[in-house]
Amino acid sequence: MLLLLSNARKPYCPPEMLEQAVAEFSEVRQREVVREHKGFLAIDLHAPKDPGKTGKLECYRRMCRLAAEFVDYNCMGVYLPEIGHMRPYDVDVISALRSEQPLDEIQEWGEPPVVLIEDDDPRLKAAVADARRRWPEFVKAFEQRQPSQTFAVKALFRDGEQGEWMWVDVSRIKDEMIEGKLGNKPASVHNVRESDQVTVKASEIGDWLYQDGERLVGGFSLSPPEKA
């Protein structure tokens, strides 16, 4: 197997194609990688030209394991052109690259996606209305919860002019206040961090969900693939 390694001190996308490349991704952290990266290291299979299905998977295993040796906190993300997937850097990306099924593992993020939605988007308005109207249903389920169940609410966190909807793993509900641990790694706000203990008002939530066996209840703002 012959590999071609390219180490470039320039963006992967030419400046005139940047906005087009950004538009290919809806997730905030993916877009940030495309916009902000300053250089890239590429590993391409030079030979054999057609390794076949089984051979291609083995080639990817070796290429991804090699790529893992170059990944550290300076790496913003890993992009796989063949499947069109961008994985922003996180603590699990190296183990995903070293796995037996790297093409699958690299797409399994440990964090919920952060997608930009305008405040006046009718889908968002409908999801918020449903979540707040059915809030007593969540409270009742939480009061009767089993140790194995997980409960979360989505709330808006602000940092100056920046705002971001993020999930909070609920540990307590008292009157109209919800206490819990921030379940997201923030993408655009910097005054809170993942796993911080936070408090939000029930009247200001934008969504909620909980597990009832294998069934997901709530998640009004999630698309069907995210609910599955």
Image (cartoon, grey):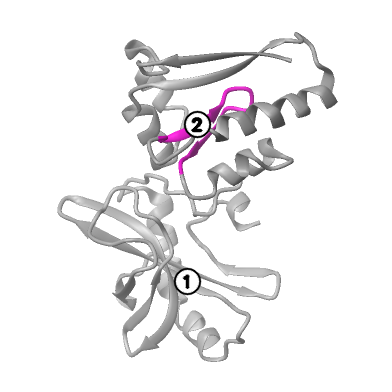
Task: Indicate whether 10 appears above or below 84.
Answer: above
Q: Assess disc 2: are there few (<14), some (14-19) or many (≥20) residues with their C-alpha within 10 Å of its C-alpha.
A: few
Q: Is residue 101 left or right of residue 106?
A: right
From mark 1 to mark 2, how far is it between C-alphas? 36 Å
Residue 66 coordinates in the image, percent (x, y)? 61, 29
The residue depicted at 32 percent of the width and 30 percent of the height is: 36
Name the residue type under label 1: Ala
Q: Earlier in the sequence, mark 1 or mark 2?
A: 2
Residue 164 coordinates in the image, percent (x, y)? 31, 54
Classify mark 1: helix, strand or loop: strand
Q: In which quarter of the image is the N terminus?
A: top right
- Residue 152 is marked as 1
Return the residue found at the far left.
Answer: 160
The residue depicted at 31 percent of the width and 73 percent of the height is: 198
Rendered image quadrant of residue 80 = top right
Q: Is residue 121 left or right of residue 216?
A: left
- Residue 201 is marked as none
The magenta segment: 75-89
Residue that numbered label 2 is attached to:
70
